[in-house]
């Protein structure tokens, strides 16, 4: 079994990087700590959001795909990300704030004997808020319109919707170290909660769905979920396990910020396994007033293409 440090980050697809910055920073109060590009396609922005210290486990990243199709709901998908807030009172603050900001939400609901608040961003991205089990770990980013005691400060859970439940469950428990809990009914589907013992007490909610067609990934959908490992040796061991099981994977990729590999779990959801950040201090950016004021940070192997990349990004915005 791999030594899993929990959810490392989740990456999603948005129509506009500037609108994403406005929503996640100005409305939700997350810190944008890195403005860069997709290393595999530098014609698109890749923005990193997180808590005040950009800690692993709080990272939520967006790829801009301005001309891509809209996401079509379905199974075999990463369905929803739940962010953490300190208290139940915070949920009521956020219900009022989202209403004021014109953000679609579903009101405060009860889920597994706890209150939650589901909502969507401007692309229809399925998100939500849940109360942290330990609010003392909170290091939210100060915001002029959000009281410190209500700041969003990390990720708590991710919903996965799959056709073949047992196959995904086996990967999460026997290989990725999650502990299975008792199943519950969720909108007439079986949902199995899983948790891992880390700082954030991250959870995965695995929904069995044999009724819907497969998701057609697009803008407003979630591209991949990353799980953390403690070091590069553990990452190499996991790559060896995938090889032994004849599971196709990307091989270990050096992102400069961290190292990782990618593979598809049994229901074709894209998983990434990633190391802790590699001396990311030189890349962390000081908050600015507007999106355009942030410098574009490039990995060293793309630096000599900066002029072309910045031109292409400017053309995408037209």
Image: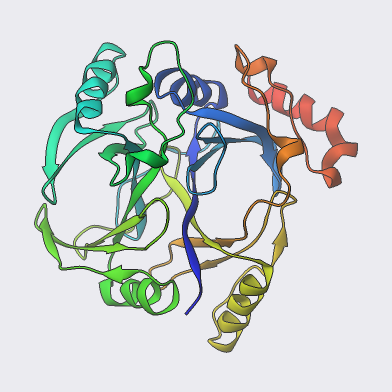
Total marks shown come to 0
In the image, taking residue 136 as reference, residue 36 lies left or right, namely: right
Q: Nearer the viewer, residue 224 or 276?
A: 276
Q: Is residue 74 above or below residue 61?
A: below
Q: Is residue 105 visible?
A: no
Residue shown at the point (34%, 61%) measured from the top left:
76
* Residue that lies at the very extreme toward the right in this rendered image: 304
Residue shown at the point (43%, 66%) measured from the top left:
268
In the image, taking residue 102 as reference, residue 237 lies left or right, namely: right
Q: Is residue 22 visible?
A: yes
Q: How is the image coloured?
A: rainbow
Q: Is residue 136 above or below residue 146?
A: below
> Which quadrant, please, contains the C terminus?
top right
Q: Position of residue 58 (x, y in %)?
A: 48, 43
Residue shown at the point (33%, 24%) measured from the top left:
149
In the image, taking residue 148 as reference, residue 57 lies left or right, namely: right
Q: Nearer the viewer, residue 137 or 315?
A: 137
Residue shown at the point (34%, 78%) measured from the top left:
170
Q: Position of residue 94 (x, y in %)?
A: 27, 23
Q: Nearer the viewer, residue 104 or 43?
A: 104
Q: Position of residue 242 (x, y in %)?
A: 56, 80
Q: Nearer the viewer, residue 296 or 188?
A: 296
* Residue that lies at the very extreme toward the bottom in this rendered image: 244
Q: Quadrant of residue 38?
A: top right
Q: Position of residue 193 (x, y in %)?
A: 24, 62
Q: Is residue 110 above or below residue 265?
A: above
């Amino acid at each position: 079994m791999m030594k899993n440090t929990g959810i490392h980050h989740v990456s999603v697809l948005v129509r506009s990087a500037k609108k994403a910055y406005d929503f996640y920073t100005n409305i939700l109060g997350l810190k944008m700590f890195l403005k860069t590009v997709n290393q595999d396609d530098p014609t698109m922005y890749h923005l990193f959001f997180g808590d005040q210290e950009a800690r692993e486990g709080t990272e939520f990243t967006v790829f801009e795909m301005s001309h891509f199709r809209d996401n079509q709901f379905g199974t075999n998908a990463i369905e929803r990300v739940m962010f953490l807030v300190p208290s139940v009172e915070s949920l009521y603050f956020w219900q009022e704030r989202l209403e004021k900001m014109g953000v679609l939400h579903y009101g405060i609901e009860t889920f597994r004997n706890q209150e939650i608040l589901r909502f969507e961003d401007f692309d229809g991205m399925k998100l939500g808020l849940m109360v942290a089990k330990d609010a003392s770990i909170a290091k939210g980013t100060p915001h002029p319109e959000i009281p410190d005691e209500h700041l969003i400060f990390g990720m708590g859970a991710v919903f996965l919707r799959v056709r073949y439940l047992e196959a995904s469950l086996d990967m999460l428990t026997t290989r990725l170290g999650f502990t299975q809990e008792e199943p519950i009914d969720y909108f007439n589907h079986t949902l199995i909660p899983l948790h891992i013992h880390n700082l954030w007490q991250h959870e995965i909610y695995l929904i069995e769905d044999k009724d819907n067609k497969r998701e057609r990934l697009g803008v407003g959908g979630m591209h991949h979920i990353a799980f953390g490992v403690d070091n590069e040796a553990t990452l190499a061991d996991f790559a060896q396990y995938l090889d032994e099981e004849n599971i196709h994977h990307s091989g270990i990729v050096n992102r400069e910020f961290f190292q990782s590999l990618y593979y598809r779990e049994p229901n074709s959801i894209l998983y990434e396994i990633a190391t802790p950040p590699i001396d990311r201090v030189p890349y962390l950016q000081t908050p600015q007033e507007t999106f355009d004021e942030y410098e574009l940070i490039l990995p060293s192997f793309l630096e000599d293409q900066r002029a072309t990349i910045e031109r292409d990004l400017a053309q995408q915005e037209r």
